[in-house]
Image (cartoon, rainbow, N blue to C red):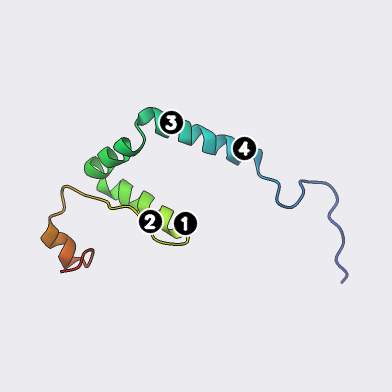
């Protein structure tokens, strides 16, 4: 069967307007909450939510993040036992 040209719709590569608006709203809220300092507070108060966010970022970024994450509830021994640090 021959391929036909698709009539109507957005051109290939045109960004979705709603997704862009949602992304802008999320980034605005992030800035109002305190940015990085808010993420540190989330990591300390709700490590499961922070780890889920971190895992999502790692999966979508295509590589490791170049940031050190300090979880105050995890001792160096706990981190070593889980293979998160050397030694």
Q: Is residue 30 left or right of residue 87?
A: right
The quarter of the rendered structure image containing the C terminus is bottom left
Q: Nearer the viewer, mark 3 or mark 4?
A: 3
Residue on which the image places disc 1: 61
Contact flag, marks 1 and 2 (Cβ < 8 Å): yes
Residue at 66% in and 45% down? 15
Q: Is residue 81 left or right of residue 29?
A: left
SS at badge 1: helix
Q: Is residue 22 left or right of residue 4?
A: left
Sequence-first tag of 3 and 2: 3
Residue at 77% in and 49% down? 11
Q: Nearer the viewer, mark 3 or mark 2?
A: 2
Q: Nearer the viewer, mark 1 or mark 3?
A: 1
SS at badge 2: loop
**Gap between marks 1 and 3, in whole Å?**
21 Å
Sequence-first tag of 4 and 1: 4
Residue on which the image places disc 2: 65
Residue on which the image places disc 4: 18
Q: Residue furthest front?
A: 66
Residue on which the image places disc 3: 29
Sequence-first tag of 1 and 3: 3
């Amino acid at each position: 069967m021959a391929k036909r040209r698709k009539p109507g719709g957005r051109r290939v590569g045109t960004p979705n307007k709603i997704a862009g608006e949602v992304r802008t709203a999320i980034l605005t809220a992030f800035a109002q909450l305190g940015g990085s300092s808010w993420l540190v507070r989330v990591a300390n108060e709700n490590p499961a939510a922070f780890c889920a966010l971190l895992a999502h970022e790692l999966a979508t970024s295509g590589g490791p993040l170049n940031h050190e994450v300090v979880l105050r509830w995890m001792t160096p021994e706990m981190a070593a036992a889980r293979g998160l640090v050397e030694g």
